[in-house]
Every structure is written in C-alpha cells, then in structure tokens.
Image (cartoon, rainbow, N blue to C red):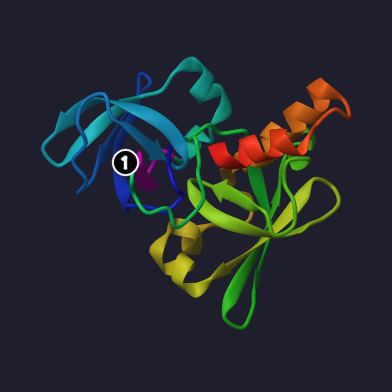
Amino acid sequence: MFTGLIRECARTLSYKDNILWLSAQYRPNIGDSIAVNGACLTVVEAKAGGFKAELSHESRKTLATENFKGLVHIEPAIVIGSRIEGHLLQGHIDAVGEITNIQKDENSTSFFIKTQNDVIKFISPKGSIAIDGISLTVNEVGEDDTFKLTIISHTMRQTLFSAYRVGRRVNIETDMIARYLFNFTQNRGNGLKWSDIDRMVALY
C-alpha cells in the first residue's frame, strides 16, 4: 500500500529487457515494493546509488512506459502505523490518461486529463485520485471522459508536474472505495446495505 506522497524524484539509468534501473537516494531491499510513477513494482536488485525493478507483461501493457526516462516519482510501501497524509493507494494502475489542456491560474495550475470511458465512472468531483503516483483531488468531471485537477504551487515544485505538457500520457489509479462500491452494486444489484459500506470504509 502507498499514500501518494512522493518520496523523491529518481533518475532513470536504463529501461530495457523489462528491467527498470533507477538512481535514487532511497535504499530499498531486494523484494521490497516500491511505486514508480504510481505503479507498484518489486525491487529485484539493489546497488550502491540505486536499484532495479522488473515489469511484468501486464504492467507493460497498462503503464505509460515511455515516461521511464529522465526523472520519475518513487514512493516506498507504507509501514503499518505510518502516518497517512494522502490517501490509500494499491499501486495498481487502472488506465493511462492524456493531458489535453493546461491552464495557469493566479496561484495554481489546472490540468485537464482525458481517460477511458470504463474508468471515468470511478472519478467524482472532490474525490481522490492518483496521477503518476501523486495523491490529488479531482476538481471537476466534464464531458468526453475528461476530468480537471487544480495543482497548487507546492505540489508543482515537489513533483514533476511542472514539466508536464499537453499530450503527455499519465498513469491513473482511481479511488479504491469508488471501485469497491461499483463492484458491490454491480454484483448485488440494489442489495447494497449500510453495513456493506461500513465494512468497506473500515478497510479503507
């Protein structure tokens, strides 16, 4: 599990033969889970100054792997008892979205992201979402499977968002409660009870 708070921006040394090699200050152990641009990967080799992680076939199909170059976001898995300041993430990417518009405001920047029709149903205004591993709040959900994020200056400085441009593809993980609720309602029709919701919230 992760929280969507970026530990550091690591530098890609290479990405070939399904192995991602990163240079980072963080020192993981072999077998550790670590989120890279939001995707939960397993550390397969730890070296002085960095580590390597392996991508499965499913991961390569789902992720925006073209962004495994230059800098990437990394976050180690949380430890039980850790303070949670973002929101709980699984590191399971639902889809790849594309930035279609960027608007600079007085003290923030708005990003408009288009995603797939089968994913937009899990995204709601003021709900939580993770973009490239960053815990964010959805500002608006528009038509044409597009949603809007308003990024404050602090987040722009501490993440790679300041370098994002129109046309960039990003990894999206929707809120797990939204996915669980949808699954319950689909499988149980109108039989969802408050006890079911309480149980899901307790897990979250």
Q: Is residue 204 visible to us here? A: no
Across and down, in percent, residue 178 comes to 69, 40
Q: Tell whether 49 sits left or right of 104.
A: left
Determine the residue located farthest toward the bottom in the rendered image.
Answer: 106
- Element class at badge 1: loop
Using the image as rendered, state which of residue 179 and residue 73 is in the foreground.
179
Where is mark 1, residue-wise?
79
Q: Quadrant of residue 195?
A: top right
Using the image as rendered, state which of residue 98 and residue 91 is in the foreground.
91
Determine the residue located farthest toward the left in the rendered image.
Answer: 48
Across and down, in percent, residue 143 comes to 86, 51
Q: Quadrant of the N terminus?
A: top left
Identify the residue at image location x=73%, y=41%.
122
Identify the residue at image location x=69%, y=59%.
126
Q: Quadrant of the C terminus?
A: top right
Instruction: Identify residue type, mark 1.
Output: Val
Task: Reply above or below: 118 against 164.
Answer: above
Range shown magenta = 68-79
